[in-house]
Image (cartoon, rainbow, N blue to C red):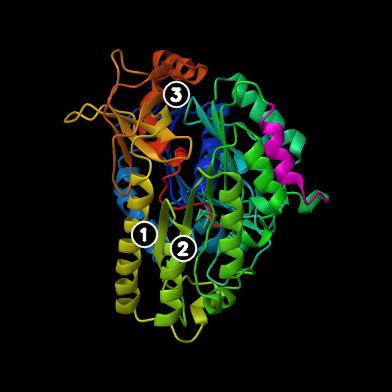
Amino acid sequence: MAGATQQRTFAIRTYGCQMNMHDSERLAGLLEGAGYRRADEGAEPDVVVFNTCAVRENADNRLYGNLGHLLPVKNAHPGMQIAVGGCLAQKDRAAITERAPWVDVVFGTHNIGSLPALLERARIRREAQVEILESLEQFPSVLPVSRESAYSGWVAISVGCNNTCTFCIVPSLRGKEEDRRPGDVLAEVRALADDGVLEITLLGQNVNSYGVGFGDRLAFGRLLRACGEIEGLERVRFTSPHPRDFTDDVIEAMAQTPNVMPQLHMPLQSGSDAVLRAMRRAYRRDKYLAILDRVRAAMPEAAITTDIIVGFPGETEQDFSDTLDLVRAARFASAFTFQYSIRPGTPAASMPDQVPPAVVAERYERLAALVAEVAWAENRKLVGSEVEVLVAVGEGRKDSATHRMSGRARDNRLVHFAPPDPAPRPGDVLTTIVTSASPHYLLADAAPLTVRATRGGDAWAARQAGDARADDYCAATPVLLGIPALRTPG
Ligand code: SF4
Ligand code: F3S
């Protein structure tokens, strides 16, 4: 327990998508700015923050289960505070302190900047503080940030979403789309590059509609090109694009900007036009496939990944088989597949013809098997080719049995490689030859062709030397590398 003169410590538990992960970096930055420090591993923090997600079925039961486990800990740790923020807090509001009266602070998605003040107020007044706003008070990017990775960073370009997909709770929790000014985005990207960051991921719920807010429909392509001008920035990625708004100027910008990576994660959700209509997704399978054709014509080496929901209400065996056909035609490098389940508060929750769970589960197995088969065939095509790998923390740990290290190729494929001696640092870059492939990764067991120490590796080493947070990176890095529990919905 922290004494009166000791710095209070915190820990943040984050659920959901990259947007939430990035919000947690802001929450950490705010708390550090307010004089808190991260709790050491294994130590009981003075403040526990839950940054929640509302997407998964039973998300609320899981939250209350976690809060219940924390009650005896809090009782044994005088002065401990518990804060609940994020999408589930925005949804459930005061119900949280009714069901878990030992929670001290509830804050929403629009006011993460209030957390330090709410904690302070709850401490002084000795009563729970609940503050949920209906719209954004301040674009989160103006808030301080405590980044998880030394060499990779997220940059939010917009928050919220103007679409109304019938399975999605996000618009009601994150509000209408708000776009950040390109100058602000680019200033943040430049500052990150100056700090040794090699790779950025531009984040938005629908990056292709970026610019609607300030009347420039070509703004996203322009932003990609402008990122190409930033010295030291080696890899630019983005998530999530929406097929409805995906325009050719973006494909051209991707193909013509060398540091924009040959990779596209574009949510499909279903390969059936009838299901897409019921989902209120304003594109059809032909349009989706035509975008992929144009992307591949411009960038033959592009790896395309997606999200697919199985068992949406009304999905017939024929609809499902349309999805399987599309997966074969699209040759996805991988896909995040989800079994549809009722999400309270969404239009789809009250639709007739909910598909029985056993049918959903059986279709899911068939889809997952096909996705793995297609991904494996795509990965095998790369055997014998040269890949450039950005060495990763966490994934980059030496495997004790094989001694391999890991990282991501330019197209975001996971690569396990035989390390040279001395081993490269996370954030360094090497080139190597792919020697074999599995459905989920590439192997490169020959000695690397080149190894390049980078400013990203220097930044990582500097943190290792001077910052205890280096220990935290392993948990965060898989997310930065594109394998989070959830994708940013799109
Ligand atoms: Fe918006 Fe994506 Fe949700 Fe659709 S799925 S409403 S595009 S955030
Ligand atoms: Fe979950 Fe909110 Fe992201 S509901 S998926 S954390 S936008």
Dot placed on the residue nearer the N-terminal end, 1 or 2? 2
Residue ID at (63%, 54%): 206
Dot placed on the residue nearer the N-terminal end, 1 or 3? 1
Residue ID at (54%, 55%): 266
Q: Is residue 69 magenta?
A: no
Residue 294 coordinates in the image, percent (x, y):
61, 53
The one of 6 and 59 positioned closer to us in this rendering: 59
Which residue in the protein does label 2 denote?
A: 329
Which residue in the protein does label 1 denote?
A: 371
Which quadrant of the view contains residue 360? bottom left
The one of 193 and 388 positioned closer to us in this rendering: 388
Disc 3 crowd rating (10 Å Cα; few below 14, some 14-19, many 20+) is many
Q: Main secondary structure of the magenta part?
A: helix
Mark identifier at residue 427: 3
Disc 1 crowd rating (10 Å Cα; few below 14, some 14-19, many 20+) is many
Q: Quadrant of ligand 1?
A: bottom right
In the image, taking residue 456 as reference, residue 223 lies left or right, namely right
Above or below, 129 against 46 in this view is: below
> In front of the other: label 2 or label 3?
2
Above or below, 142 against 460 in this view is: below
Distance from Cα at disc 1 to Cα at disc 2: 11 Å
State which quarter of the image contains the C terminus: bottom right
Label 2 SS:
helix
Q: Amino acid at mark 2?
A: Ala
Q: Amino acid at mark 1?
A: Val
Q: Is residue 391 visible?
A: yes
Residue stretch rendered in magenta on the structure: 215-229
Dot placed on the residue nearer the N-terminal end, 2 or 3? 2
Labels 1 and 3 touching (C-beta < 8 A): no
Distance from Cα at disc 1 to Cα at disc 3: 30 Å
